[in-house]
Image: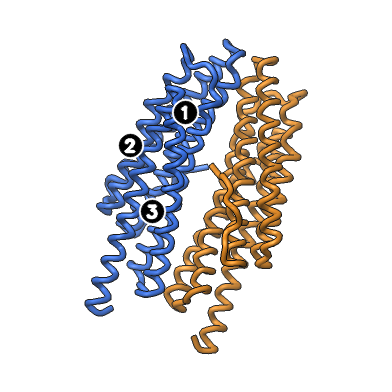
Chain colours: A orange, B blue
Amino acid sequence: MNEHTVKAFDEDITRLRGLIAEMGGLAELSIQESLEAMINGDAKLAKDVAKRDKKIDALESEVDKLAVRIIALRAPMADDLREVIAALKIAGVVERIGDYSKNIAKRVSEVEERKHFEPLTLLPAMGELAAEMVHDVLMAYAARDAVLAREVIAADHKVDAFYNSIFRNVVSYMMENPATISSAAQLLFVARNIERIGDHATNVAEMVHYAATGSYPPDEDDG
Amino acid sequence: MNEHTVKAFDEDITRLRGLIAEMGGLAELSIQESLEAMINGDAKLAKDVAKRDKKIDALESEVDKLAVRIIALRAPMADDLREVIAALKIAGVVERIGDYSKNIAKRVSEVEERKHFEPLTLLPAMGELAAEMVHDVLMAYAARDAVLAREVIAADHKVDAFYNSIFRNVVSYMMENPATISSAAQLLFVARNIERIGDHATNVAEMVHYAATGSYPPDEDDG
């Protein structure tokens, strides 16, 4: 590449990274707001989350188009090409994180009686942890920070532990309150969605680690 | 491109398509076997599914590497570049379909008492439908068949209807048999995983439709 091409490529990559940062910010907000909507039974806020998901999807399309254009126009090689492919993949994962929040928001109307509904009180701390993972992994991406990426990977065990504890709690609650089983089942799905958000943040962290160091961190089980 | 380059590009694309067909065949088998393992409590078969998932993951890495190499060496433009990017994305979705089966297989040991456990009888027909969607969408991909792709998209409503019916059935069963709630909750997750497989097959169908016709079919809600 000549100097002009290098400058143009750098500008493109900066825009690509900016789009992904924007997607990440929206995805993080949707995690928090979808849980707030679930806990308070706030249908309007749930609708905001659903609307925001369309924006996240549109940003992913923009990333795709820009990435394809960069490859076609600049014909990047080696590390530069890997960077563009990584951006494509990370945008795909962030879009999925958005889907999980949208799915939580959709379930708001399926939970019927919120007063004294204990299982609800277990969700916010788990949601905060997952939102923090998403926040941190995008910081790690922006700063190409392998150390922070490994911290995100380590935090996933905490989200998994939360999930297991919530699962046991909700099942006990169901046994004692069979009339609430349908609503409580929705909370199992919500907890599961948050757990998946943690898994996806971990996936991004692995990609960031790879981009920063050239090697993947030790394997994680993400199914 | 000169004649040699065109031929080399076509060979690369054929290999890329072959890898995706192989991934799809394994993913389809895993849907069937994960449900068979779940229904019969077959821990060995569940292990086979988990092992096969590693093979699917490895094939996805191969697709990624080959796609990057094609872009770097052949510098494809326009339609050809879109084809390579589509292959990257489709491989990613098929890998996720594999993850859902692995997740079902993981839950085999969480279901405790299988005799007379009615909710189990509801799963095979739903699983068959989802496996058929995965099969058909890969046929549509191989043949660039937009009509078959639209049929896959239409079938997703049947999978969703199955899911809703299973959800209601399992919840009623839980109310009547509180001692089985923990096992029955696992089946809710299994049904949800199958429903997500249908969603992902639909996503691939949309990509196939786009690649074949240049436009996306009417929007589907996939969260």
Q: Three-letter amino acid code at disc 3?
A: Met
Mark 1 = which residue?
B43
Q: Which residue is drawn at 58% across and 78% down?
A: A10
The image position of residue B30, as x and y in percent, is 40, 37
Number of the front mark, 3 or 1? 1
The image position of residue A30, as x and y in percent, is 66, 48
Mark 3 = which residue?
B207
Residue B154 shows in this picture: no
The image position of residue B203, as x and y in percent, is 42, 47
Establish whether labels 3 and 1 are both on one chain.
yes
Assess disc 2: are there few (<14), some (14-19) or many (≥20) residues with their C-alpha within 10 Å of its C-alpha: some
- Is residue B171 toward the left or the right of residue B36 in the image? right
Q: Given the current orientation, which residue lies at the most extreme bottom position?
A: A3
**CB under 8 Å between discs 2 and 1:** no
Point out the image quarter for the N terminus of chain B.
bottom left
The image position of residue B100, as x and y in percent, is 48, 39
Assess disc 3: are there few (<14), some (14-19) or many (≥20) residues with their C-alpha within 10 Å of its C-alpha: many
The image quarter in which residue A69 lies: bottom left
Q: Three-letter amino acid code at disc 1?
A: Ala
The residues tagged by marks 2 and 1 sit, at their Cα atoms, a distance apart of: 24 Å
Q: Three-letter amino acid code at disc 2?
A: Glu
The kind of secondary structure element at disc 1 is helix
Mark 2 = which residue?
B132
| Chain bearing mark 3 | B
Q: Residue at x 76, y 40 (%)?
A: A125
| Chain bearing mark 1 | B
